[in-house]
Amino acid sequence: MTKPNLTLYLAAPRGFCAGVDRAIKIVEMALEKWGAPVYVRHEIVHNKFVVDGLRDKGAIFVEELSECPDDRPVIFSAHGVPKSVPSAAQARNMIYVDATCPLVSKVHIEAQRHADAGLQIIMIGHAGHPETIGTMGQLPEGDVLLVETPEDVATVDVRDETRLAYVTQTTLSVDDTADIVAALQARFPAIIGPHKEDICYATTNRQEAVKAMAPKCDAMLVVGAPNSSNSKRLVEVGARAGCAYAQLVQRADDIDWRALEGIGSIGITAGASAPEVLINEVIDAFKARYDVTTELVETAQENVEFKVPRVLRQPA
């Protein structure tokens, strides 16, 4: 029986970003240096396959520092942590390694700089996301106010409308964030923004590739985890850019083949914490069912690399 033809559009860039790469490397190097177990506060990155792989090597994932013993190293996730967490680790004389993405750390520094200048900060982000909790936790309670939508801007209660700055989560939709920034600037004309936008290069690049790919596709799959903010944004961007069917899948087993019946083209991309092995697994699943022609949709090239902390580069 002949397979139906399918054009598979593959987005580039896709998958791992430099911050995720560095965070995973930090856990692996910590295991090499100190042996197992090494504790990790929160999922190092939002991907079950990656977390399970590190768990198999001896990493123990916990939600709070209180679950870690004093005598084993602990790593803080790529999403960043409130200031109270490293302070608590220091108070217990723990060895800790901060795997916060440097681009998230940049936002933390920015928030502190604005606070030092006497400004109250408005953060654009998702309530409850670890990155938002970490950024808001850089300053005392009440110094950072959260808005999630343009509608929130109308009701946010500030101390002084002339003494404000805003920061954003690094993994948001570029277009949605622009709408919220416009609402902030309309209500608070004196509000100060970042020198360079906070949404990271990897989030922006992956969204741009999806925008270029989506109009060509009958359907689009984003390989990523359901708790991954940047992956969920890619699904939304794809749908908004004209793709009739855009879905998130963790791996090939999650593909709803019945929903894809009759398609002539599929777009594939992946969130910044999804490894290439899972992307290839999805591509192979299509090749098993279709006569696939692959086309690359490349909108940018990435060559960013972040160094691991010095403590891991020194001998034990």
Image: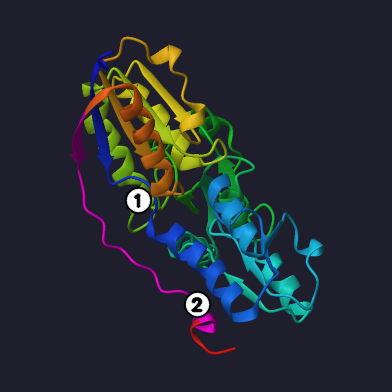
Which quarter of the image is occupied by the N terminus? top left
Q: Secondary structure at mark 2?
A: loop
Which quarter of the image is occupied by the C terminus? bottom right
| Magenta stretch: includes residue 212 | no
Residue placed at 30% from the left, 28% from the top?
267
| Magenta stretch: includes residue 307 | yes
Q: Which residue is mark 2?
A: 309
Identify whether 232 is placed above or below 37.
above
Near-viewer residue (8 or 147): 8
Specify whether 302 is left or right of 126: left
Near-viewer residue (208 or 74): 74
Identify whether 230 is placed above or below 91.
above
Name which of mark 2 and mark 1 comes first in the sequence: 1
Q: Which residue is mark 1?
A: 202
Q: Secondary structure at mark 1?
A: helix
Query: Farthest residue in the top direction?
Result: 262
The magenta segment is: 293-312
Near-viewer residue (118 or 75): 75
- Residue 290 occupies quadrant: top left
Could you tell me residue 43's position as x and y percent? 62, 53
Q: Are marks 2 and 1 in contact (CB under 8 Å)?
A: no
Q: CA distance from mark 2 to mark 1?
A: 21 Å
Near-viewer residue (35 or 245): 35
Could you tell me residue 276's position as x and y percent? 38, 48
Query: Farthest residue in the front direction?
Result: 1
Amino acid type indicated by mark 2: Pro
From where the camera sits, is residue 192 visible? yes
Residue placed at 64% from the left, 58% from the top?
55
